[in-house]
Amino acid sequence: MQSFFPAIIILSSNSLFDALSILLIILTTIIILIKKGSGSPKITIHGTENFTNKNGVIFVASQIRFDEQFAMLNLPLKKILVFDMSGLAGHPPQNTALHNKIIYIQPILGLRGIVKCLKEARVLLKNNENIGVVTEWFKFEGGFEIDSYRLIKALIKNINAPVIPIHLEQPKGSNFTIRKKGVFSRNIINNKTHWYIFAGKALTTLEEAKKIKSEIQDLSVKAAKVTYNDLPLVHIGFALQALRTPEKPCFPDNVNPKLNLNYGKALVAVSCLGNQLCHELKDEKTVGVWLPNSTGSALTNIALGTIGKISVNLNYTASIGILEHCIKKSGVKTIITAKRFTSKVNWPEIQGIRLIYLEDIMQKISPTQKALTFLASKILPPNMFIKIILKAHQPHPDDTLTIIFSSGSTGNPKGVMLTYKNITSNAWSTIKGADVDFTDCLLGALPFFHSFGYTVSMWTPIQVGASIVYQPDPRQARDIGAACKSYQCTAYLSTATFLRFCLKKSEPDDFKSLRILICGAEKLPIQLAKDFEFKFGILPLEGYGCTELSPVVCINKGDIRLPGGTILGQMAGSIGQIIPGVSIKIVDPDTLDNLLPNNEGMVLATGANVMKGYLDDPEKTASVIKDGWYITGDMGKINLESYVTLTGRLSRFAKIGGEMVPLERLEDELHDLLESSERICAVTCVPDISRGERIIVLFLPSILASFDIDVKTWIKKLSSKGLPNLWIPSEKDFHPVTDLPVLGSGKLDLASLKAKALEIAGEKA
């Protein structure tokens, strides 16, 4: 790769090209300014049939701020009730027309301030005027909380005003965002932006009003599907971003700083690499990738998507049996790798598989091709460059972009087919949900065979011009901390397992620059989060996703501090709030009937992010997707503000004496007793003749001993927590082991855990 990228660097310094670039930038800027100054936002309203004939209606939206509030004025309403954020630094100038339409809740005035605003709004309702309400989950300095339902309940008491849920959609999100230092302009949309307003069916009772947030979330799914065509597919989105901001850093290279690439150079690399891969791969449709997460791996995956090949990122930590299964299942004949990588991670020779090396491919790309591609990127209009030079594939949105094999925690991995639409929709939902923009620098330490790494650490940042620093091994905590500090990364995606490495080996000021630290793939123990915050000054927040959902579903976010209180963005112990464009419902696991908020059941999710299906397994696909809803297999509950709390995995329950015992909950209780962020034990079950199943606890004796506690005392402490007797394992069912089986993603390997338990204790079943 070294012989390829320096040629681009030298090329970019050519004075003739620089002069042409400056001239083109000036002309482009003039055209943009002329276009920007003309026209006005276009508004499309869906669901007007849900507007009632009566007046005195409440239109309820959620977390609508700044420019979005102005779009809301297109509804037939008199006033909008919102929380006052004008005290934030950098708050946009108040629009006179908007200001005169707003009733501001001023938290600094405390409860009397909100009571005054509610009285004004109620007078309007009694006079048959329509009002809008923008809800927030807000905590006043005195500790009093007000959520969406409580606010609506106070408004319609003794009035019985119909409540119409509203969702405002701008495909790329608001033009403003809130940072620690105040309001920040994202500069991604202009005056001709197309806003969409979606109205749901009127809720006419207090009981129905409890569903307001879930109704708004459902509307966001409808909106995402309708507005999807306003967004370019991810490979086109990257190219457009690169042509728009060619000098913006794209892939700062943590391993080899000489290979640092800005967006312009990255686009040239993708174009030339894609062209060469077309010759190498010919008619092969599915292509394997055997590389760690790195600049080279990212460029390879982007290039494969751009030329219309289906990428299969192979798990280089898996056994040869699992690897052969994935290769055979996906029909891969050729695997792209690098000599530098195979010298460290031996490729297990598999018959009939051809390896091609990135170093060899790069050498076949001529200097002339690099130069002409670079020149074309500076001269040609974007659409012409994408069509003629990049030769970007124009897929149907439902065409498969990648096949990601599931973790295999409960058996052989399943091939999950994710489409261009899946990845594009989830990337933009994540951008809006996690608030990612061009100022961010993401630290990517999760491998691309992990859906979290593939979507969030690669495709998502390059849609908005953010930078990505790759660290190939998520266990190398010293290197991860040093990279974060060196590049002043603002976002880091990890798992609880890998955070434990950082807690032990990273320096206290390594993560000082972070504003987003999200953990997924496994449960984030509260003690681990507290220990991490104590050492590094940033609290890890839990998110949630599934490979089958492309993968992101929920995210906890940072709180927003206002004079007088806080807009809550996170909920301890939860997996966060559902992101835009995705919806969750909780159902009875046996009947699949919907359950009300705060009731435990099975978690189902829907949206444009739901996978195309399992590879060559229509029966399995049909068993997990019902009417567009994916059955996650997780148990949980959802509160009135759309925050989801998981209570266990359906497959991680033991059935003892006819009762369901949550093994993950028991695991958490055992760890909580020790107040440790270490993973000390894992809980599973084996068959039992008399009771159906029996709980087995495998533990690490050396770590347990460091807490000066034995198994008998551990069980005694567990019993004192008031848990049902059925949940308490006997002393004979605690077994010491040298290690606990984990997957490459850091998740427990449940299949190996069960096998180990059967080997140790099964003969006693």
Image (tube, rainbow, N blue to C red):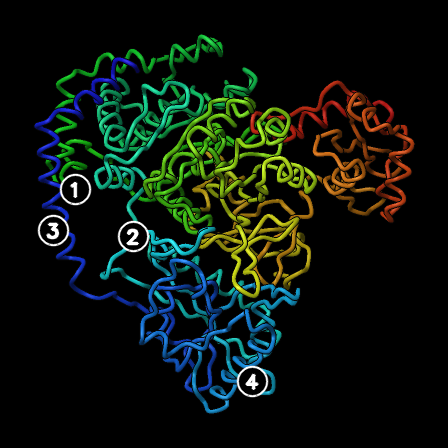
Q: Earlier in the sequence, mark 2 or mark 4?
A: 4
Label 1, label 4: how many angstroms apart (C-alpha)? 54 Å
Location of mark 1 (residue): 383
> Of tags 2 and 4, which is closer to the observer?
2
- Choose top left, top right, bottom left or bottom right for residue 160: bottom right
> Which mark is drawn over residue 187?
2
Q: Earlier in the sequence, mark 1 or mark 4?
A: 4
Please give the count of numbered marks on the rendered protein: 4
At mark 4, the secondary structure is: loop
* Residue contact between numbered discs 4 and 3, judged by CB atoms under 8 Å: no
Query: Looking at numbered disc 1 in the image, what kind of residue is underneath it?
Result: Asn
Relative horizontal placement of residue 372, taking residue 656 as reference (left or right)? left
Neighbour tally class for label 3: few under 14, some 14-19, many 20 plus, Cα within 10 Å: few
Query: Looking at numbered disc 2 in the image, what kind of residue is underneath it?
Result: Asn
Label 3, label 1: how many angstroms apart (C-alpha)? 19 Å
> Which mark is drawn over residue 160?
4
Label 2, label 1: how many angstroms apart (C-alpha)? 22 Å
Q: At x 12% / y 29%, what residue is drawn?
A: 375
At mark 2, the secondary structure is: loop
Q: At x 57% / y 41%, what residue is drawn?
A: 538
Quadrant location of the N terminus? Answer: top left
Q: Earlier in the sequence, mark 3 or mark 1?
A: 3
Query: Looking at numbered disc 3 in the image, what kind of residue is underneath it?
Result: Ile
Query: Looking at numbered disc 4 in the image, what kind of residue is underneath it?
Result: Asn
Residue 313, given in percent of the width and then of the height, sits at 43, 26
> Of tags 4 and 3, which is closer to the observer?
3
Q: Earlier in the sequence, mark 2 or mark 1?
A: 2
